[in-house]
Image (spheres, rainbow, N blue to C red):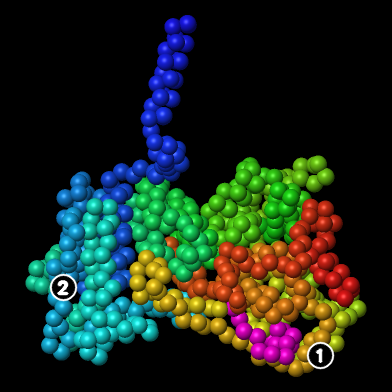
């Protein structure tokens, strides 16, 4: 034992001496260095393919690229790249895939000036470039190639470019890419293809067709799963407007998600990987919808829960055995709070929105008839078989036992909300509100129609502008700082009679998007007290996209900043009078936020 201790002491002395020989800076670097995950060659090769895929699909305006089916190409491309065993085979596969659809591309293991481009314009040539934009009212991006009137320059949005401008030069792993984003075109045919490239295009199309004629199009197929990552990742990489607000290693998410797709085997696993990837963007609008049969609806247990005092507490119930204030412990034998936290991890957005959505999704199902719940009340456990028999009309519902849409809850104090399509403020209602002592406006959720705008128009003597709605102009790839924005804000004109009483707005994390547009106006123009909790922190029109295998996803395609230019995304609207629910208040079936609003009006 004594000799063993001597050996240990000797090793320790040698270790310390070695550390002393290393420069201090080097020691600090070694200790503080973040260890990047190691991926195999196949994942790295697929990452290279994915990056090039995005550049060619969205920024190279050749006729071939405009006409290819990019979903089919992605699936086949994954399969082809997986066959590459070394760098030489990878380069050959990349050229087989991309050169036929981008004849002027250069892919090389060494940095070279693109040899496939000539600055000399052919006779009668014009310039062609991709223009991606979205209408303020549309769910989709529109992508079209636009043409100049001559070969000298081309206008894209409000910028002028010449042939050779904006060429994409990138080193991706060991592959050097050079790709023009502006081409010459004669008689609406892009210049650059050759007899060889046309022959290779025919061969590529035949290979894709042959592969797709006998392949599994479901998410049991790894190629389809990885193609979903590649398409989604590139969509965000080039068009998501909030990377400045959410500083993350999005490039690092690509190999991580590809590897994750290799580890799962089915549709449910695919869905989990996609949600985990998107959760990094902290966008409350992001949602992936699985292969849903439109004839099969989503149903929810007709109760609501909320994360209160570190417990899942019932806020509303139409299940007779369950009451507000009950603590949800188990759902079909699983720990409800643990399941709730797992759902939060897969939800994109602010903490408050994650809690909101996780509480909703915990109690929703598409194929289960009922669930076994265990709740706690006054120290007693109650087991209930609760049906999935409530069909939500919105992704948020059943948060509170609300008052009627329009009611006088105390003499001279009116309560209104805008969650019913039938709630239209007529002249009689406006007349009553204009003489009221106080008005409580419930924006805890998603209002419908133009009624909120009508109400706000009677609170002011001047025009009310919304926050800044900024439409991205993606000229340059990789969410470049050089990309500009178009302002698309709108206004509300004042109307008579003006409401003179004190106005209090109720809000919380269930207020998202349009709700936050309304609350942003309230906040900026100080139209009333704001009682409750922070809003979701996600605003801007939604974009949708369909993926191979039947999945569909949504995300925020419009950037919104507050009136003063400060950040709204992942922040939201904060209450002027914060009020949180308590278990005691919920048990007593009290709406503590509404109570505070009444108190403020009476004090006034």
Please give the name of the residue rendered at 43% of the width and 55% of the height, measured from the top-left corner.
Answer: 249
Please say whether residue 50 is one of the residues in the magenta stretch: no
* Quadrant (top left/top right/bottom left/bottom right) for the C terminus: bottom right
Residue 577 percent coordinates (x, y): 77, 66
Instruction: Characterize the local packing of mark 1: few (<14), some (14-19) or many (20 or more) Cα atoms within 10 angstroms.
Output: some
Please say whether residue 463 is one of the residues in the magenta stretch: yes
Q: Nearer the viewer, mark 2 or mark 1?
A: 2
Please give the name of the residue rendered at 41% of the width and 54% of the height, measured from the top-left corner.
Answer: 253
Secondary structure under tag 2 reads: loop
Asked whether, in this view, residue 279 is left or right of residue 111, the answer is right
Asked whether, in this view, residue 540 is left or right of residue 522, the answer is left
Using the image, tell me which numbered label, if any, was put on residue 117. Answer: 2
Asked whether, in this view, residue 409 is left or right of residue 354, the answer is right
Task: Give the spatial CA distance, label 2 vs label 1.
Answer: 71 Å
| Most distant residue in the bottom direction | 496
Secondary structure under tag 1 reads: helix
Vertical position of residue 96 compared to residue 541: above or below: above
| Most distant residue in the left direction | 195
Whether residue 519 is visible: yes
Residue 256 percent coordinates (x, y): 40, 50
Report the magenta residues as a range: 454-467
Please give the name of the residue rendered at 17% of the width and 50% of the height, measured from the top-left corner.
Answer: 89
Q: Which of 522 and 6 lies nearest the eye of the viewer?
A: 6
N-term-proximal mark, 2 vs 1: 2
Please give the name of the residue rendered at 73% of the width and 53% of the height, measured from the top-left corner.
Answer: 308
């Amino acid at each position: 034992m004594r000799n063993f201790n001597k050996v240990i002491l000797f090793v320790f002395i040698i270790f310390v001496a070695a550390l002393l020989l290393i420069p201090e800076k080097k020691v600090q670097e070694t200790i503080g260095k973040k260890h990047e995950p190691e991926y195999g060659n196949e994942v790295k090769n697929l990452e290279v393919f994915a990056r090039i895929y995005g550049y060619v699909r969205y920024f190279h305006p050749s006729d071939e690229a405009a006409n290819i089916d990019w979903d089919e190409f992605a699936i086949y491309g994954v399969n082809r790249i997986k066959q590459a065993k070394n760098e030489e085979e990878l380069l050959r596969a990349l050229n087989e895939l991309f050169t036929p659809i981008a004849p002027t591309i250069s892919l090389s293991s060494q940095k070279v000036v693109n040899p496939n481009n000539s600055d000399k314009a052919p006779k009668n040539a014009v310039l062609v470039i991709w223009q991606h934009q979205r209408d303020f009212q549309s769910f989709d991006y529109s992508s079209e190639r636009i043409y100049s009137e001559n070969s000298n320059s081309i206008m894209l949005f409000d910028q002028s470019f010449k042939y050779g401008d904006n060429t994409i030069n990138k080193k991706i792993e060991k592959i050097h890419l050079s790709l023009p984003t502006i081409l010459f075109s004669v008689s609406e045919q892009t210049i650059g293809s050759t007899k060889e490239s046309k022959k290779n295009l025919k061969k590529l199309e035949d290979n894709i067709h042959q592969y797709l004629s006998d392949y599994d199009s479901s998410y049991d197929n790894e190629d389809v799963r990885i193609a979903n990552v590649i398409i989604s990742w590139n969509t965000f990489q080039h068009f998501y407007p909030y990377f400045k607000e959410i500083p993350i290693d999005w490039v690092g998410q690509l190999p991580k998600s590809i590897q994750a797709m290799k580890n799962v085997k089915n549709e449910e696993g695919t869905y989990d990987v996609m949600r985990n990837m998107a959760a990094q963007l902290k966008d409350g609008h992001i949602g992936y919808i699985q292969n849903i049969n439109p004839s099969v609806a989503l149903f929810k247990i007709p109760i609501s829960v909320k994360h209160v005092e570190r417990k899942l507490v019932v806020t509303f119930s139409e299940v007779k055995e369950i009451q507000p204030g009950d603590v949800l412990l188990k759902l079909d034998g699983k720990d409800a709070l643990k399941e709730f936290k797992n759902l939060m991890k897969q939800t994109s957005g602010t903490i408050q929105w994650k809690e909101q959505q996780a509480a909703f999704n915990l109690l929703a199902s598409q194929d289960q008839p009922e669930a076994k719940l265990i709740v706690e009340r006054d120290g007693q456990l109650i087991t209930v078989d609760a049906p999935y028999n409530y069909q939500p009309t919105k992704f948020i519902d059943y948060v509170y036992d609300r008052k009627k849409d329009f009611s006088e809850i105390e003499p001279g104090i009116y309560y209104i909300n805008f969650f019913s399509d039938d709630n239209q403020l007529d002249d009689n209602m406006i007349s009553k509100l204009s003489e009221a002592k106080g008005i409580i406006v419930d924006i805890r959720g998603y209002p419908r129609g133009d009624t909120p705008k009508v109400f706000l128009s009677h609170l002011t003597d001047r025009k009310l502008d919304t926050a800044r709605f900024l439409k991205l102009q993606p000229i340059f790839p990789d969410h470049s700082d050089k990309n500009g924005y178009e302002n698309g804000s709108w206004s509300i004109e004042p109307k008579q009679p003006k409401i003179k009483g004190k106005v209090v707005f109720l809000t919380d994390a269930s207020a998202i998007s349009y709700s936050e547009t309304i609350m942003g106006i309230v906040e900026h123009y100080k139209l009333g007290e704001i009682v409750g909790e922070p809003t979701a922190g996600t605003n801007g029109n939604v974009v949708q996209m369909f993926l191979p295998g039947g999945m569909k996803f949504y995300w925020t395609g419009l950037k919104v900043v507050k009136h003063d230019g400060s950040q709204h995304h992942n922040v939201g609207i904060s209450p002027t009078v914060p009020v949180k629910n308590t278990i005691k208040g919920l048990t007593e079936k009290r709406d503590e936020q509404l109570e505070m609003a009444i108190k403020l009006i009476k004090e006034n």
